[in-house]
Image: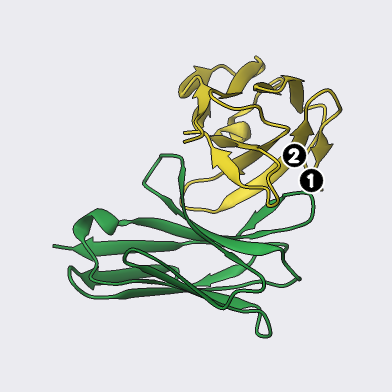
Chain colours: A yellow, B green
Amino acid sequence: GAVVSQHPSRVICKSGTSVKIECRSLDFQATTMFWYRQFPKKSLMLMATSNEGSKATYEQGVEKDKFLINHASLTLSTLTVTSAHPEDSSFYICSASVMSGSYEQYFGPGTRLTVT
Amino acid sequence: SQQGEEDPQALSIQEGENATMNCSYKTSINNLQWYRQNSGRGLVHLILIRSNEREKHSGRLRVTLDTSKKSSSLLITASRAADTASYFCATERPGGKLIFGQGTELSVKP
């Protein structure tokens, strides 16, 4: 089956630093990748949609300059949290999609970000 | 809010009992999907039901979809302690975006 990995699985960083999270599709080419954010005991909130080779489309209320998304290849998308603050602490999950009629998405295992 | 509603928010049952979770949404959809998430982990896709389908089965899972009421239900029969997890419905919008419901936290006691 389609496998999506995320790296790192956990990261702790100091306020003001930037953190990069990678999302990779391991055995398929993903035309589209999605980034979600999840607070404890809450649902997933879609942050942005990223298509290979083009700019990401951000959901309303998500700061583009804060959450930089780069989809450099059909197997890799990165999310960089710039100048992180404690309120950015969250669980970030990516998914990758292959166009096959319906956009079936395959989810990564998530990255736990803690900003101190 | 673009998100759908799920109820109950939390459900506690004994092993062997059935668990029913409901999901309502607001706009027209391409399909509706159910996912499971163990605490602090990623999502596991359970089942997808298309907008022109009314019911779908997969093992101990049964999903219904009523597009006139904009609602879906997930039934887990003969529950096991290992079914303890959070369950989310998600509606697919044009462009492949998934909009998740608030989730139901299921606890199955042995």
Residue B103 percent across, percent down from the top left? 49, 61
Other-residue count near label 1 (Cα within 10 Å), few / some / many at <14 / 14–19 / ≥20: few
Which residue, as the protein is rendered here, is positioned at the far bottom?
A: B68
Write down the chain letter for disc 2: A
For disc 2, the neighbor class at 10 Å (few under 14, some 14 to 19, many from 20) is many
Residue located at (41% from left, 39% from top): B41
What distance separates the C-alpha of mark 2 from that of mark 1?
6 Å
Assign a secondary structure to mark 2: strand
Q: Is residue A78 above or below residue B14?
A: above
Q: Nearer the viewer, residue A52 or A41?
A: A52
Badge number at residue A59 = 1
B41 or B1: which is nearer to us? B41
Instruction: Say how many tags the image has.
Output: 2
Examine the rendering and report whether any part of residue B94 can be seen.
Answer: yes
The residue under label 2 is: A48
- Pinpoint residue A38: horizontal percent, then vertical percent: 56, 44
Residue A30 lies, in percent from the top left, at 67, 31
* Kind of residue indicated by mark 1: Glu
Seen at 29% across and 57% down, the residue is B84
User: Would you say B61 lies left or right of B83 here?
Assistant: right
The answer to which quarter of the image holds residue A72 is top right
Q: Are marks 2 and 1 in contact (CB under 8 Å)?
A: yes
Left or right side of B98 for A89: left
Dot 1 lies on which element? loop
Q: Chain of mark 1?
A: A
Label number found at residue A89: none
Q: Amino acid at mark 2?
A: Ala
- What's the residue at 50%, 19% (across, down)? A8
- Mark 2 and mark 1, same subunit? yes
